[in-house]
Image (spheres, helix red, strand yellow):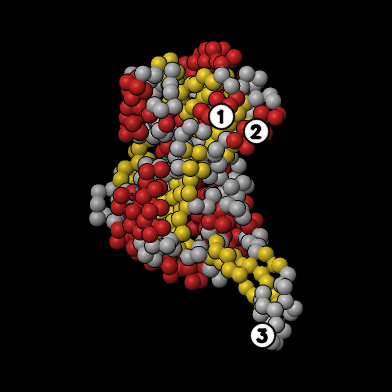
Amino acid sequence: MAERFKNLVAGRWEFPDENPPIESLNPANTSDLIGIVPESTPEDVDRAVKSARDAFSGWRLVPPPRRAEILFRAAELLVRNKQGLGELVTREMGKLLKEGLGDVQEAIDMAYYMAGEGRRLTGETVPSELPDKDCKSVRVSIGVFGLITPWNFPIAIPAWKILPALVAGNTVVLKPSSHTPVCATRFVEVLMEAGLPPGVVNLVHGRGETVGRELAEHPLVDGVSFTGSTKVGEGIIRSCVGVGKEVSCEMGGKNPIVVMDDADLELALEGSLWAAFGTTGQRCTAASRLIVHTEVYDTFLAEFTRKATSMRIGDGLTEDVDMGPLVNESQLGRVLEYVKIGIEEGASLTTGGNRLTGGRFDRGYFMEPTIFTDVTPQMRIASEEIFGPVVSVFRATSFEEAIGLANSTDYGLSSSIYTGDVNLSAIAERELDSGLVYINAPTIGAEIQLPFGGMKKSGSGHKEAGGKGGAIDMFTRIKVVYRDFSGKLQKAQIKE
Ligand code: NAD
């Protein structure tokens, strides 16, 4: 019998069975059924939101350092369970075990960091222009948040949202991706074990079109934090803005790495390989465009292709594997479709492009690392997010052309430049149109203590992670307080 992973509503674990359950399969071996979760209904969402609403009145009054203690205990529990959770991430999502462990580590880092924020939820105190008067700003909780998450960081992204929301005194309903529901459930179990009161965190499994939509549009939800595709995110923004709801969305990317002629080529190759094919290209910050200076283009391309073709593909739980499977059949189909589109558009397929079949590959969703050349910025493979192990390599004759190419898409999440010239690196930092810029490092590798998020079609609203300027801004509102203790009417700005 398949293990059943449940919803959590008002502190009770439940498995509504109005619809047939959703199966969670291992993408490296589809005969491995990880478990089943309910395909919930809008009514389940409604009960979860009401439970979060009820819990909010108490939770918002718990002093933040006390809320933080629960987060600290969660961090300790995550440390203790890191290996098992990391293996689960790999089994359910497909990334390599070391990356699965990294996924959990991000949640650990965030739990410790947000526990610290419990004693740092500062506002400002400023002098008044009038005597005997205080002026200050304080941070207040917002209310009930609907949190909607994707499958590619199945523990880290729920952690990035839930932990700052809680320390700031909000209550939440999480709708995780239906492709990685077990990871989310295990993470919520840890939070409950750490001592959260009932109703502060609620979990509802199900499909985006029903459960996700209902959560985003529910009138008792005060704010929505979404991570996922730009298409879905834009719909959520429209529905929230229309009714004055708080909304922050982290969305897709088409991230470039620029390799200049003075770059440390070995370093640039290593970084490009990791950014393009790490996590099988299924990171919002994955590099899908490599823009290489013409002086080093041929050497770079030959070596990059050689390294890509020698990557070992397989189950991320086994040793000696460099790249795991895609997350599911439809994602694999979508990526293969883009390979077809690239060929039809006239790009040259330098290597890869095929599904891997035969033997152990038949049990999962594996494909070859894929490289296109002769790509123009107008092509769909150069401008649309593919979200798989497919990269386009461009030739640039100057720094200016390289930066122009880097900025030539509607996305603006992450970008990188490899150069030995400190002045060029400073200009690139200024000119690259993205929320994250890396110098002599690949487009992936953000750390949780700084805000994370994109510009243009990659992000909207507040940034994730970090403290003030990031997640704490997302989950608090500023209230300004003036206290006049002069005992008389004093009028700001008025001369009498
Ligand atoms: P997706 O947009 O298909 O789904 C994301 C979540 O939204 C899922 O939980 C899904 O069930 C839900 N959803 C789908 N339709 C919905 C609707 N109409 N209303 C409400 N919710 C709905 O994305 P995905 O395939 O799960 O994840 C991959 C995408 O996520 C990529 O585009 C990637 O770039 C992006 N991503 C972005 C970041 C970032 O921080 N910028 C991080 C990770 C992933």
In the displayed structure image, the side of residue 335 where residue 477 appears, left or right:
right
Q: Is mark 3 on a helix, strand or loop?
A: loop
Q: What element carries label 1?
A: helix
**What mark, if any, has residue 403 been given in the picture?**
1
Q: Pointer 2 and pointer 3: residues touching (CB < 8 Å)? A: no
Query: Which residue is depicted at the point 40% across and 16% down?
Result: 348
Q: In which quarter of the image is ligand 1?
A: top left
* Mark-to-mark CA distance, 1 and 3: 58 Å
From this view, report whether residue 264 is shown above or below residue 182.
above
Q: Name, please, the residue furthest toward the front.
A: 496
In the displayed structure image, the side of residue 401 where residue 232 appears, left or right:
left
Query: Which residue is depicted at the point 60% across and 29% down?
Result: 417
Q: Earlier in the sequence, mark 2 or mark 3?
A: 2
Q: Position of residue 474 (x, y in %)?
A: 53, 56
Quadrant including the N terminus: top left
Q: What residue type is labelled 2?
A: Ile
Q: Where is residue 313 in the image (x, y as percent from the top left)?
A: 44, 22
Q: Mark 2 points at which residue?
A: 427
Q: Pointer 1 and pointer 2: residues touching (CB < 8 Å)? A: yes
Q: What element carries label 2?
A: helix
Q: Name, please, the residue furthest toward the bottom.
A: 487
Query: Which residue is depicted at the point 67% across and 74% down?
Result: 493
Q: Which amino acid does label 1 sit on?
A: Ile
**What mark, if any, has residue 489 been given in the picture?**
3
Q: Earlier in the sequence, mark 1 or mark 3?
A: 1
